[in-house]
Amino acid sequence: MENPAQKLVVRNIGLMLSGKIEDPILDADCIVAIDGKISAFGYEKDLDTDDATTIVDANGVTLAPGLIDSHVHPVVGDYTPRQQQLNWIESTLHGGVTTLISAGEVHMPGRPKDIVGLKAMAIAAQRWYENFRPAGVKVLAGAPVIEHGMEEQDFKDLADAGVTLLGEVGLGSVKDGPTAKKMVDWARKYGMQSTIHTGGPSIPGSGLIDADMVLEAGTDVVGHINGGHSALPDDQIVCICEGCLKGLEIVHNGNERAALLTINTARELDQMDRVILGTDGPAGSGVQPLGILRMVSMLSSLGNVPAEIAFCFANGNTARVRELDTGLIEVGLCADFVLLDQAQHAPGETILKSVEQGNLPGVGMTIIDGVVCSERSRNTPPATRLPEVVAR
């Protein structure tokens, strides 16, 4: 006998955010998912909600696509030797993040830098996070840091083994534009996305990557354009924004002033759809379970960005730049959601107005592939209202 379809219904939604920067608020109060994929959304009276295996009453809170952290440095499982901390990924789930994207497993003690070793580690990292989701969180990992001596065949080997990402260009021995461009082009030929370190050195062994190298390398994402931690001079940041058409990644562990400069420049260029968010953790600044929510709040309140647009930086924009099957409310995509509400006693007439005043919302539930993974967050301020599972 075939297993019956798993059907999730989330009803009584007060506000539904789409993740789509061109149309961020949906006219809907209910969403349905079958076997982990969105099958319909709209008004409950118009949808087929019969035979649900899981029913969530949102109790009037906001539903958004799960947040995506575009820049993390995982190592193994749910442990980071960088800060000697366990369960940092599960803690991040309580900040509304349902997908993490590796910018390189560079904190692995004894990280191999020879070509055979770096390829082996990248393939292993891709495999162990494919086979293990800490607390249900999707970790897209296995991001090799390029080194001198790599040839085109090495990138084909990695891609054939399932590796889809390059770690931050510039963290290894390749620190010149022509070599970086050659290797980035090889990676792209075999379907691998690339990110470049931007700004001053982050850890011993890394170096300055300036605007000239960023533009010459031509990666798919300008990693931490606001520095990780040290940002480039203002004129170089503006030059990068104007000179490339790739993703502009702003991170929590960067320069806040440079983040606002990037937002203002993207707005002037009418290219806010290029802005994506990451934390750049775990790192020397530690682990930031609420890092993505803090970036949404900061950019909205100080960058004069409507909150519903700022949330798109954290899900839909990243989904499109990274070519993911999540991060948007769209039929056929993964049913990855975060349910939020205005924090108790926080100022602002609505959750959006509260975020625009710099306040964090409270996370009440996360759902990944149609499965409830966490309920009331232990990390955010307590939400005014909470969703609840009424049938399972």
Image (tube, grey):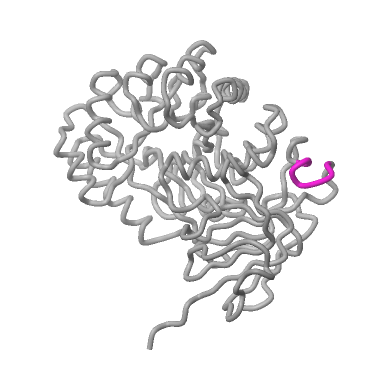
Residue drawn at the location 34% of the way across and 56% of the way down:
128
Residue drawn at the location 68% of the way across and 64% of the way down:
43
Question: Seen in the image, is 29 located left or right of residue 204?
Answer: right
Quarter holding the N terminus is bottom left
Question: Seen in the image, is 28 located left or right of residue 198?
Answer: right
Quarter holding the C terminus is bottom right
- The image shows residue 194 at horizontal and vertical percentages of 34, 35
- The image shows residue 298 at horizontal and vertical percentages of 67, 33
Residue 358, quarter of the rendered image: top right
The answer to whether 147 is drawn above or below residue 77 in the figure is above
- The image shows residue 230 at horizontal and vertical percentages of 51, 20
Q: Which residues are magenta?
A: 348-354
Question: Seen in the image, is 56 located left or right of residue 234?
Answer: right
Q: Residue furthest bottom?
A: 1
Residue drawn at the location 73% of the way across and 40% of the way down:
355
The answer to whether 34 is drawn above or below residue 128 in the figure is below
